[in-house]
Amino acid sequence: MRRRRRVTLLSMIVFTGLLAGLAAAETVYVQATTAKLRAGKTSLDTVVADLKFGEALEVLRKEGGWLEVRTAADVKGWIFANKTTATKPAGGDDFLAKLGKSMRRKEASEVTASAGARGLDKVSEEYAKRVGMTQQDRDAVDRMTAYKLTDQEVEDFLKDGGLGEYAK
């Protein structure tokens, strides 16, 4: 009888410990307007999920400035810790949408939105001429918009400068 009580008592202690471990799981919330859940701990790793502002994440482990987390949809990945907060942010998608609308004057046209990718379009070019922008300045804008960086160059820049996920 005593042996049976000890086994039962031991089982209860182990079970209680397991429950306590589950209850101790840390939850963080996405505090950035845009956040990517990645397969690894660099900004070059594959995106496994796009996260929403205020979304709850279960912390699985911490490594440096990165958190390995699990979403409510059971997707596991890594997020830079400064994109999260321990307390649920106020607002949410509706709040962010209203804020964006209040700050936005008007939608960019398709022409305007794509102009940066290919230099000045004809309308922008005519405007630049009307306001006295020199050809030299227009050429400089075209050169800047044509300049491309590789993902690795961006990653190296962040590392060298101690920026983003590499901030100390």
Image (tube, rainbow, N blue to C red):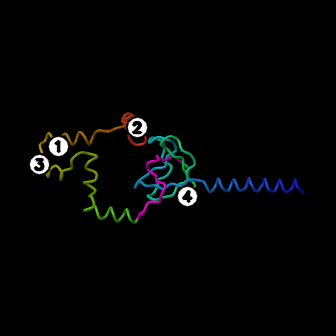
* x 46%, y 40%: residue: 42
- How far apart are labels 4 and 1 at the CA level? 49 Å
CB under 8 Å between callouts 4 and 3?
no
* x 36%, y 63%: residue: 97
* x 28%, y 61%: residue: 103
Within 10 Å of disc 2 (Cα), the crowding (few <14, some 14-19, many 20+) is some
- Identify the amino acid type marked 2: Glu
Q: Which residue is mark 3?
A: 129
Within 10 Å of disc 4 (Cα), the crowding (few <14, some 14-19, many 20+) is few
Q: Earlier in the sequence, mark 3 or mark 1?
A: 3
CB under 8 Å between callouts 3 and 2?
no
Q: Hey, which quadrant is residue 32 in on the image?
A: bottom left
Image vertical order of residue 156 relative to residue 23, above or below: above
The answer to if 25 sits in the magenta stretch is no
Q: Which residue is mark 2?
A: 155
- Identify the amino acid type marked 3: Lys
* 4 vs 3, front mark: 4
Q: Earlier in the sequence, mark 4 or mark 2?
A: 4
Which region of the structure is painted magenta? 77-93
Within 10 Å of disc 3 (Cα), the crowding (few <14, some 14-19, many 20+) is few
Q: Earlier in the sequence, mark 1 or mark 2?
A: 1
Image vertical order of residue 133 relative to residue 31, above or below: above
Q: Which residue is mark 4?
A: 72
- How far apart are labels 1 and 2 at the CA level? 30 Å
Label 2: which secondary element: helix
- How far apart are labels 4 and 2 at the CA level? 29 Å
- Identify the amino acid type marked 4: Ala
Q: Which residue is mark 1?
A: 138
Describe residue 13's horizontal placement relative to residue 118 as left or right: right
Q: Earlier in the sequence, mark 4 or mark 1?
A: 4
